[in-house]
Image: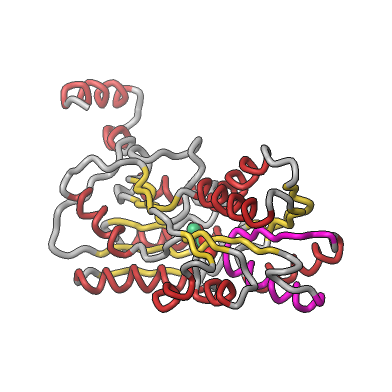
């Protein structure tokens, strides 16, 4: 905004009883260029290898740069994550990396940081786009194309089954952007495939044991299922246990596709128990801090810094498992 326009605007609202500071709070907070920063990282939970790999990557990069990292773990609670962000604001961090557990409940945290003049970079999950926007309320979203991940999982299943599958879908955390988008990508693809049907769909909260329990119940109700699509590898591994407990052969009686690319999933592919997994790379550290540096320099940051994903199946799982997390 032109300085003159800003001053005019500020004067205008001052007469309405709103301070000039409130006007400038409408703008995205800036980040000063400094040698060392104190940076927050608000993690959602630590109950799976993906989260642990992500946290390690963030901690390693902060240590490499000599930055102080204020790390919090919301232990699976959006309410705690909001409180965690508020505590980072109180501690005066320079910037907050936030992995919003769910799309809507974390909006107040994004807005509180903005109001306090602290820039936020969203990591790995997004917020509701009708309530907050990149370049206005937060700097950018760094992460994968979840719709595309879901589409690729559906395509892999289509190819392996010749377009015939009765599918149980294990959804991720309800209200989270990867669960919403991975469902959309998959369901949009199978709309044009008359032989592919989702016969049951329920959340397993992205967790292995919850995935196992939900798969167990759904398999009892739908013994005719021929495929399982899990929104992440942890739930897919849980589903393998459920299938085996029910006396079925995963990979033969029931085909399994999922997303992430964990070591356990690659091993399941090698063992013939899983068909494929679409990669979702958790190693955000270098890209997160590089984006932060670009922002401090005054660069215009694109609203979405896209991570590109590989694909793992029996053609490459053996070669790539050594690097898996
Ligand atoms: O797939 C899952 C994790 O937000 C992209 O969250 C991430 C997902 C990831 O718990 O394993």
Which residue lies at the image location 67% right of the left edge and 73% below the top edge?
Answer: 209
Front-most of residues 192 and 87: 192
- 246 in the magenta segment: yes
111 in relation to 275, above or below: above
Q: Position of residue 97 (x, y in %)?
A: 36, 58
Res 252 quadrant in image = bottom right
- From the viewer's perspective, is 236 left or right of 222? left
Front-most of residues 154 and 27: 154
**Which segment did they paint magenta?**
224-247
- 112 in the magenta segment: no
Q: In which quarter of the image is the N terminus?
A: top left
Which residue lies at the image location 63% right of the left edge and 67% below the top edge?
Answer: 236
- From the viewer's perspective, is 59 left or right of 158? left
Q: Where is residue 314 in the image (x, y as percent from the top left)?
A: 53, 68
108 in relation to 86, above or below: above
Q: Where is residue 112 in the image (x, y as percent from the top left)?
A: 41, 48
Which residue lies at the image location 34% right of the left edge and 30% below the top edge?
Answer: 18
Q: Is residue 108 visible?
A: no
Which residue lies at the image location 39% right of the left edge and 48% below the top edge?
Answer: 141
Res 137 quadrant in image = top left
Q: In which quarter of the image is the C terminus?
A: bottom left
Front-most of residues 129 and 190: 190
- From the viewer's perspective, is 5 left or right of 318? left
């Amino acid at each position: 905004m032109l300085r003159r326009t800003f001053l005019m605007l500020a004067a205008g609202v001052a007469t309405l009883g709103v301070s000039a500071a409130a006007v400038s709070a409408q703008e995205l907070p800036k980040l000063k260029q400094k040698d060392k920063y104190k940076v927050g990282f608000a993690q959602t939970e630590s109950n799976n290898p993906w989260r642990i790999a992500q946290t390690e990557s963030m901690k390693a990069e902060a240590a490499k740069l000599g930055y102080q990292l204020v790390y919090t773990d919301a232990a699976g609670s959006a309410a705690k994550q909001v409180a965690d962000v508020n505590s980072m604001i109180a501690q005066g961090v320079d910037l907050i990396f936030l992995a919003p557990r769910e799309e809507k409940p974390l909006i107040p945290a994004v807005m509180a940081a903005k109001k306090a003049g602290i820039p936020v970079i969203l990591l790995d999950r997004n917020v509701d786009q009708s309530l907050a926007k990149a370049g206005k309320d937060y700097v950018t979203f760094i992460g994968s194309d979840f719709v595309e991940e879901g589409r690729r999982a559906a395509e892999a299943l289509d190819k392996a089954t010749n377009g015939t599958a009765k599918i149980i879908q294990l959804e991720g955390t309800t209200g989270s952007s990867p669960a919403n988008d991975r469902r959309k990508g998959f369901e949009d693809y199978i709309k044009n495939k008359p032989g592919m049907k989702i016969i049951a769909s329920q959340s397993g909260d992205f967790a292995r044991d919850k995935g196992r329990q939900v798969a167990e119940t759904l398999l009892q109700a739908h013994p005719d299922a021929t495929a399982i699509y899990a929104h992440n590898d942890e739930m897919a591994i849980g589903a393998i246990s459920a299938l085996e407990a029910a006396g079925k052969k995963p990979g033969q009686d029931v085909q399994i596709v999922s997303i992430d690319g964990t070591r356990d999933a690659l091993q399941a592919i090698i063992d013939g128990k899983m068909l494929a997994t679409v990669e979702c790379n958790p190693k955000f550290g270098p890209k997160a801090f590089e984006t932060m540096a670009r922002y401090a320099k005054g660069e215009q940051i694109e609203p979405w810094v896209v991570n590109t994903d590989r694909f793992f199946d029996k053609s490459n799982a053996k070669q790539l498992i050594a690097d898996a997390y």
